[in-house]
Image: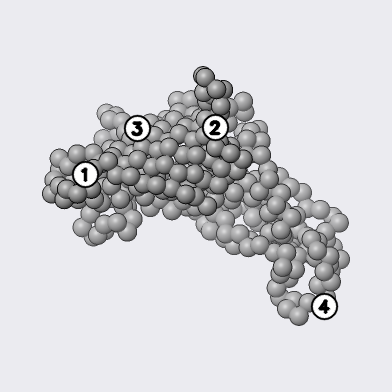
Amino acid sequence: MAKLTVESMDDPVAPPPAPTGKTPMQRVLWHGTINCDLDDLMLGVVNQNTDMWKVKSSYVEDNGLDYFLLASINERTIEKPFDGLQVKWTVNDMGPLVAKPIIRPRDFVYLESTGITQSPTTGERMGYHICHSLEMPGVPELPEYKLVRGKLELYHIFRQKSKGVVEVYARALCDLQGEMPSTSVTMFSAEGMSSLTLMAFCAERHKVMWLMHTMEPCESRKPSLNLCSVCTKDLSKSLLPFMNKACRICSGRICARCRIPKRLSFLNRRTRGVIKKNIDVCTRCVHTSAHMNALTVAQGELSLENPTSIFYESAINRSASSVSSASSG
């Protein structure tokens, strides 16, 4: 999926400094490639509201505990669906890198900027994702909740190296404050940047959910035909009939060979919590979603009254109803 190199800017020979409250920022450089298109990567990176942020974090598994969009300075538009400037707050439990009973979670307040620009010399399209910590009087530190306010700077630059391959240049500077070994800080920074490799996976799931939201069930693929809607195999002769399912996108009946299980993250409309569910998708719909233009998907979302609606749990319920009604047809 990705080829990467992580390089610490600290002296690799010298021992790590003793953990103190004044441990300097740890710097990490990251360079590599991700197998996807630039627009796909940007679709995975951009999350300009809290609900979308939660869903995408569930795919990236970034150890986030809480998320909140404090302010949206520049919102994305249909013309520029990847461009935006927001102020965000998040809490990170530090993952498996540290002893959780000893080390407190860190929270961060930062400015995030995303978008696509063009090189002034070559005209080449280049994506960017920049995060920079802020000190805001209206967002004080929260020691009463046992949170330590950290500081971070992240700089990500993306360019299309070749068809289906994006080159990534990244730099991270992180100060987790408090008493923390510098090696743990470096690992935290490297882990955060390596999550970029999952952004293409996130975009792939995003496009599946968009197709599920927009595609109407095809009448010609009713399960009552008792044929696989992809390979036309006679399902009545299947040795393992329980393996035959219906595609949750097009409602077509599918055999085990033409079925691809997908684990998707949905939002509970009432609690706003993330729920993961397994759905069955036919190979045809998987191929269709994979080849959808990510820029077109992002623009299509913004044309909806509520762009976040494609992530609601009700989307999978509507799909299940379509499959059920087709089965009874």
- Cα distance in 3D space between marks 4 and 1: 66 Å
- Secondary structure at numbered mark 3: strand
Name the residue: 55% across, 37% down. 161
Measured from the top left, where is residue 155 in percent x and y? 39, 34
| Amino acid type of the residue that numbered disc 3 sits on in the rendered structure | His
Question: Residue 20 bears which disc, if any?
Answer: none
Residue sitting at 55 percent across and 47 percent down? 35
Left or right for 37, reference 33: right
Query: Label for residue 82?
Result: 2
Query: Do residues under tags 2 and 3 come within 8 Å of each other at their CB atoms?
Result: no
Mark drawn on residue 237: 4
Choose mark 1 or mark 2, whichever is in front: 1
- Which residue is denoted by mark 1 in the rendering? 11
Which is nearer the N-term, disc 4 or disc 3?
A: 3
**In 3D space, how far apart are the residues under numbered discs 1 and 3 (Cα atoms)?**
25 Å
Q: Residue at x 34, y 32 (%)?
A: 132
Residue 325 in sight from this viewpoint: no
**Residue depth check, mark 4 versus mark 1: number of the one nearer the observer:** 1
Q: Which residue is mark 3?
A: 132
Q: Secondary structure at mark 4?
A: helix
Q: Is residue 242 left or right of residue 54?
A: right
Helix, strand or loop at mark 2: loop
Q: Nearer the viewer, mark 1 or mark 3?
A: 1
